[in-house]
Image: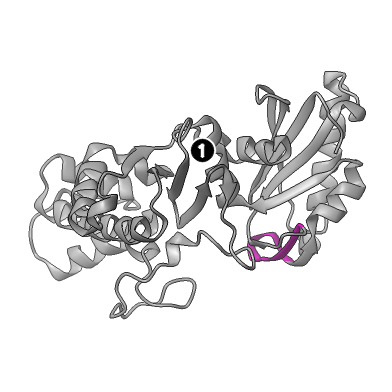
Amino acid sequence: MSEGKYVIGADLGGTTCKLGVFTADGEVQEKWQVKTNPADNGSWILPDIAEAVDKKLEALGIRKSDVKGLGIGTPGAVLSDGVVNRAVNLGWGVVPVAEELGKLTGLPVKVGNDANVAALGEYWKGGGEGLSSIVMVTLGTGIGGGIIINGKILTGYNGAGGEIGHIVVNPDEPEACGCGNHGCIEQYASATGIVRLAKQELEASKADSILRADKGQLTAKDVFDAAKKGDALALNVTTKVCNYLGHTLAVIANVINPEAFILGGGVSKAGPILLDETHAVFERDAFHAVKNTKILLAKLGNDAGIYGAAKMIID
């Protein structure tokens, strides 16, 4: 790999691919994004990224010989040789991303699972900066995760490490998770899961609630906002959410023993009402030697993926 002055980080999602040009010591020079085109089984995605990179380097006056490489986070399980094994929302089956994108750009390419790569970004320049090991938990539409131990992503045997959203916390759950199992933490503590719990509570109870007046699309934010106002029904829901989440973090801490958990994604913006109760449950359920694990908030937001992708190349 060349000792370039620059590295490129890419974070590929179902709607857009975010991109960044960084110096070799991690200072971001330029950020932009291009649309993800999943047509024709996603065959346009990598050529579009390569074209966007070429145009940006030309506009910035950066020669390819000065670029150390391109890191990219993608959905799906990523094998050690940079092959992505199924990314349904991209239309991909088995795609040798490192090889194909390397040919298209003429650059060395390193590929990682998007959640793992975002965790690496937060570890490096975000909420985990200066720590030795973290577990990142992204509470969004679903729940993603990434485990970083001494600066290295724990990918597991076949690239599926860090699938925190699919830890089963309630095997008696009658409804199936999107993954096919029953009772995954994603069914309770993701934005979708919180709304699901709130709707169940509204149907099961005749109690007055601010949430009944919500004629639009109920959101997780609505539930936390109502709980902050002391709404008893909403507080029932947030207590369930924090119980499941705190218990899940305790289980992970007992196995991984990280220095901190970093919570990201839209749900993490609920603030103390989420953090304080989750932390109390964590301390209740964790093994005594790991009770002092910190629970912190992510800092990089949507940029975590490009930072982590750049860091893969820098390393």
Q: How many marks?
A: 1
* Magenta stretch encompasses residue 89: yes
On the image, which quarter does residue 61 sit in? Answer: top right
Q: Residue placed at 18% from the left, 63% from the top?
A: 202
Left or right, 263 with respect to 152, comes to: left
Q: Residue placed at 47% from the left, 44% from the top?
A: 133
Q: What amino acid type should be assigned to the residue bearing mark 1?
A: Tyr
Residue stretch in magenta: 82-92
Tell me if residue 2 comes above or below residue 260 in the rendering: above
Q: Residue placed at 82% from the left, 28% from the top?
A: 56
231 and 249: which one is in front? 249
Tell me if residue 230 comes above or below residue 79 in the rendering: above
Instruction: Give the secondary structure at mark 1.
Output: helix
Left or right, 108 with respect to 152, comes to: right
In the rendering, at what x and y percent does residue 68 appear?
Answer: 82, 33
Image quadrant where one finds the C terminus: top right
Q: Is residue 18 visible?
A: no
Q: Is residue 50 visible?
A: yes
On the image, which quarter does residue 82 sit in? Answer: bottom right
* Magenta stretch encompasses residue 241: no
Extreme residue toward the front, this view: 289
Q: Residue placed at 82% from the left, 20% from the top?
A: 60
Residue at which label 1 appears: 123
Query: Pointer 1: residues within 10 angstroms few (<14), some, or many (20+)?
Result: many
In the rendering, at what x and y percent does residue 303 appear?
Answer: 57, 34
On the image, which quarter does residue 84 sit in? Answer: bottom right
158 and 106: which one is in front? 158
